[in-house]
Amino acid sequence: MAQGDYAQDGYILLKGFFAEAELHAVEPILKKFHQIWLEENSEAYHKGAINSHSLTGADSITSQEKITLFRFIEQQKFASLFKQIFPQPPLFLNTQLFFDPKNATQHNYWHRDIQYTAISDEAQQQSIQTLNVVHFRIPFAGEPGIELIPGTHRHWDMPEEYAVRKSLDGKLPHHGLKRGIALPLERGDLLVFSANMIHRGLYGMERFSLDIIYCDNTPDMQQHIDRRNMPDSNERKQLSNEICL
Ligand SMILES: O=C(O)CCC(=O)C(=O)O
């Protein structure tokens, strides 16, 4: 039973979406990537990093492992969700792994992903009316989950929400927001949510989640795709290639 309607709320939570066997197929690859990432990025981790990215472009992952990841990324089980969310078939944008900060007292932060682009607030308000950049969050352990404000994938902030995410008027990005709803997650769940809605990660429980990010297949979004994260010509022979640039 799904909670949330993407068009109206900006998110869909599907409890028990994945069978154990589906998670087992990719889990060792994620664990291996993460172990090597921690060794190579110890400084960033100690300084507060809570995520890594670009698994499908990583030197630490073999070509065969990349094919396994790409098959997971383009799996048929997502097809009906893509239809609900995107007006046209989407593009695969990138992957991220989310984990807890080294320092357990580190604060989380409300944000819209689009706020980290160079475009003005006015252009952001315009852009979110139609733009779809969507996380598919796949937790491999139980986690406190994501807190989000339903509907803000299409609607701008209330004044207090804006002040919190922009650190204005004495507010800070980790302060509580009245309209926020927390969505705790268990292994096997799938949480689909718009990157452009107001949201924050909730840390704890030694979380370990794979986020696959898909976006509208538009010339503008194509520019944001790093070709190193796309399959090479040999890998493409074993894939459907429907959502990779
Ligand atoms: O889980 C987190 O720490 C933050 C997730 C997030 O903000 C995102 O995926 O854009």
Image (cartoon, rainbow, N blue to C red):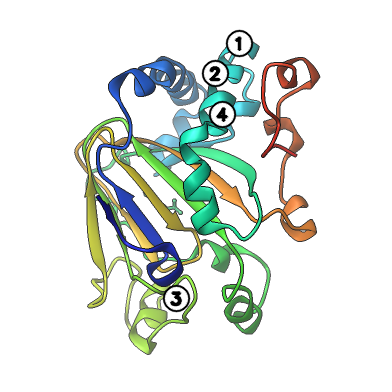
Tell me which amino acid carries mark 1: Gln
Q: Which mark is residue 166?
A: 3
Residue pictured at 24% horizontal, 66% vertical: 181
In-image side of 210 versus 120 (left or right): left
Residue pictured at 19% horizontal, 38% vertical: 205
**Where 49 falls versus 84 (above or below)?**
above
- Check whether the beta carbons of the residues at disc 2 and disc 1 lie within 8 A of each other: yes
Residue indicated by mark 2: 68
Residue indicated by mark 1: 64
Residue 62 x %, y %: 61, 12
**Where 218 falls versus 100 (above or below)?**
below
Query: Alpha carbon of mark 2 to alpha carbon of mark 1: how far?
Result: 6 Å
Disc 3 residue lies near ligand 1 with CB under 8 A: no
Q: Earlier in the sequence, mark 2 or mark 4?
A: 4
Query: Alpha carbon of mark 3 to alpha carbon of mark 1: how far?
Result: 43 Å
Give the total number of marks visible in the rendering.
4
Tell me which amino acid carries mark 2: Thr
Q: Earlier in the sequence, mark 3 or mark 1?
A: 1
**Where 126 falls versus 101 (above or below)?**
below
Residue pictured at 52% horizontal, 58% vertical: 85
Q: Earlier in the sequence, mark 3 or mark 2?
A: 2
Residue indicated by mark 4: 55
Give the foreground label among 4 and 1. 1
